[in-house]
Structures are given as structure tokens and as C-alpha cells.
Amino acid sequence: ICEDNNGNYITLDEAYYICGIMNTEIVYKYMMQSSDSRSFPIRPRIYIPKYDDHNKIHKGIVRLSKEAHKVYGDIDRIKIIVQEINDLYKCILEDK
């Protein structure tokens, strides 16, 4: 993912934001239950609001996603980070 729906390039922080959401347990379960596991849609039907660098929840997902990329070999830390991102994504879904 390098562009938004309007063809504008996304920022590095927006890439981390999207990556964080795409790696939540909620999205994983949805994708596994709504798709054939041999192939997934190119445009997944996942709710990801446009990144807002003034939104604390969005910024929290970015921070955690960046941390996860740094400690990807630490399985225990990754589990904690994924749970924290999952909780933040639930907040986004509740505000929907």
C-alpha cells in the first residue's frame, strides 16, 4: 500500500498505522473467517479510517507498530504490542 483511495502517496507514519491495524487479532480473525485461506482479496473489506496525525489513537498505533518492527524477534513483546494495538483498533471501531 503506497497510495490512498485518491491516488495520493501515504506517509511513512500512515504505512505503520495501516500495518498495525492489518496485524491486529480482529483483522486476522475477520480475514480468516470471511475469505478462502488460499487467496485473499486485493482490497480487503477492513475499516481503516484515513490516518490523522492529530488523533491520539492513530498516533498510538503508529508508535506501537514502529516498536513491533524493531523487536519483531521478541515473541513475548510482540504479543503485548499486538494486544495493545488491538485495543486501540477497538476504540476506532467503537467510534465508527
Image (cartoon, rainbow, N blue to C red):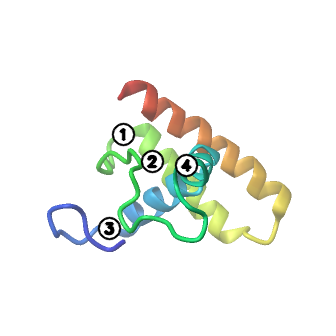
**Among the two numbered marks 2 and 3 on one chain, the one whose residue lies closer to the N terminus:** 3
**Disc number placed over residue 11 in the picture, else none:** 3
Spatial distance from mark 1 to mark 4, Cα to Cα? 21 Å
- The answer to whether the residue labelled 2 contacts the one labelled 1, judged by CB atoms less than 8 Å apart, is yes
Amino acid marked by disc 1: Asn
Amino acid marked by disc 4: Val
Residue 16, percent from left and from top: 47, 63
Spatial distance from mark 2 to mark 1, Cα to Cα? 6 Å
Q: In which quadrant of the rendered image does the C terminus lie?
A: top left
Q: What residue appears at the point 82 percent right and 65 percent down from the top-left corner?
A: 74
Spatial distance from mark 1 to mark 3, Cα to Cα? 15 Å
Front position in the image: 26 or 71: 26
| The image quarter in which residue 69 lies | bottom right
Depth check, mark 3 against mark 4: the one in front is 4
Q: Residues within 10 Å of mark 2 (few under 14, many from 20)?
A: some
Amino acid marked by disc 3: Thr
**Disc number placed over residue 7 in the picture, else none:** none
**Disc number placed over residue 27 in the picture, else none:** 4
- The answer to whether the residue labelled 3 contacts the one labelled 4, judged by CB atoms less than 8 Å apart, is no
Q: State left or right for residue 69 relative to residue 8.
A: right
**Disc number placed over residue 55 in the picture, else none:** 1
Residue 12, percent from left and from top: 39, 69
Q: Which residue is mark 2?
A: 59
Element class at badge 4? helix
Q: Residues within 10 Å of mark 1 (few under 14, many from 20)?
A: few
**Among the two numbered marks 1 and 4 on one chain, the one whose residue lies closer to the N terminus:** 4
Element class at badge 3? loop
Residue 75, percent from left and from top: 83, 62
